[in-house]
Image: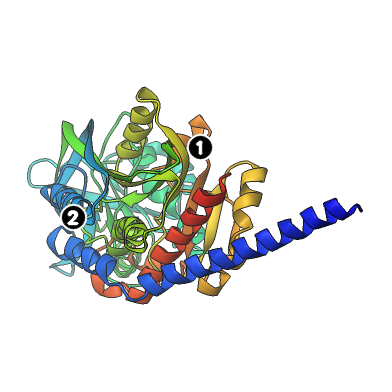
Amino acid sequence: MSRIALIIQLLLIINLSFSQNTDKEVVRKIFDNVLTSNEAYNNLEYLCKNAPGRLLGSEESIIAVNFMKDYFEKLGADTVFLQEFSTPAWKCNSTEVSILVDGKEIQLRADALGPSPSTQGKGLFADVIEVQGLEELKALDRVGIQGKIVFYNRPVDMKIVSTFRVYGSAIDQRYYGPRVAAEMGASGVLVRSVGTRIDTFPHTGSTGFKDIKIPCAAISTVDANILSKALKDNNALQVKMIIDAEDIEEITTYNLIADIRGNEFSDEYIVVGGHIDSWFNSPGAHDDGIGCVQSADVMRIFKELGIENKRSIRVILFMDEELYQSGGNAYADYSDANNVNNYLALEADAGGFTPEGFTVDASDSVVGIISGYQSLLEPYGIHYIKKGGSGVDIGPLKKFGVPLMGYRTDSQRYMDLHHSAYDTFDKVHIRELQLGSGNMAAIIYLIDKYGL
């Protein structure tokens, strides 16, 4: 090796070492800041207490959007605006489910699935058929199903370690179950809540109707066991369902967008966000108020520490991840129509528990670049950065070739509260929340600094 080449190599090593030390210092400052801040925590408390049940089209969803809009403006974002779009909506006013046992009416704790239709007249009274899944129902004689209520009672598979996969082991009953039952002539559907606890909280969610819609609701796991036992004792048992709900043909609603402008590549946007809506029965603390306040906290961290971002950082609080996923599609359409250059998008929608890692939906080369930052973040709980999924709201950007990321946490408690009234502010630990904000800010700082 020539003397000049050796000098160049040594200078590169020194420069790399200097950069790594500088990055460690910046990352440390990010966590020093975030672990002594309670702004995101306070913002989440406001959302849960003043705007619970933030389903698309509700007054609470607009209260939440306006509150966070004011926050971004006070924070000094360069741009804050409401991205308006139109979409169908659905509203649930009430759900009642009961059984008659020994002359007594026993209420079952239930919440309608979206977008269930209302029951007619004084409600639906019908015999019940219990099945353990879609295939068992499809194997039955259609004549025996006509006019009856189908009760899907297959529990989740608790032997699976990842609770998102536990959820996946029974979600087909909730999403496709009402459609299949309707096509076979059933008059209504009850679904065992998809969750990891035996408790009295019904877990709602969306269902994929096609041409025929019938009343449908989720009942708590405790009540599913009560109903199943009652059916074993009396197979002629009838269930009473009363659902008051309505389809809304079209509403105007909004994604909330806030930017801090980049000083070098201002037309390239690093997107970070979560969904501001929550189900009608839930304060939506972990799903996904926490992802929204963490994303907003990324902006606060950059502003307070004076981190000079090359690219514009865009925080998006998406509307309607839960029911029709219209907000994510609306932003993708907006980006396409306005030639928005989304450089990368990161979504936080896995609860606000202890951080575990990031998953990256991108080319192997991009995954390789981003995974190189793991060592800098490992002291703060990031144990992996690997190829994987991202999030529902940013998913529509994939068709434009945008690299996508998902922030991941320890999921073991998530399905205890998912889509239920149990998802309350008191289930959030401030340090777990803040570690998430810090790791999201740190990975964005590194990606912005070095590029992809």
* Residue 341, picture quadrant: top left
Res 353 → quadrant: bottom left
Q: Amino acid at mark 2?
A: Lys
Residue 36 shows in the view: yes
Q: Is residue 79 left or right of residue 400?
A: left
Circle 1 residue: 402
Observer-nearest of 145 and 57: 57
Question: Which residue was labeled with disc 2?
Answer: 74
Comparing 269 with 291, the one in front is 269
User: Which residue in the rendered view is the most extreme toward the top?
Assistant: 337
Q: Residues within 10 Å of mark 2 (few under 14, many from 20)?
A: few
**SS class of the residue under badge 2?**
helix
Q: Quick check: 208 left or right of 50?
A: right
Rendered residue at 16%/44% (across/down): 91
* Residue at 21%, 58% in the rendered image: 281
Which type of secondary structure does the marked residue at label 1 adopt? loop
Closer-to-camera residue (430/76): 76
Figure check: 97 above or below 423:
above
Quarter of the C terminus within the rendering: top right
- Outermost residue toward the left in this view: 122
Q: Residue 185: x percent and y percent? A: 32, 36
In this rendering, would 330 be left or right of 56? right
> Is any part of residue 235 visible from this angle?
no
Q: Residue furthest front?
A: 3
Disc 1 marks a residue whose amino acid type is Val
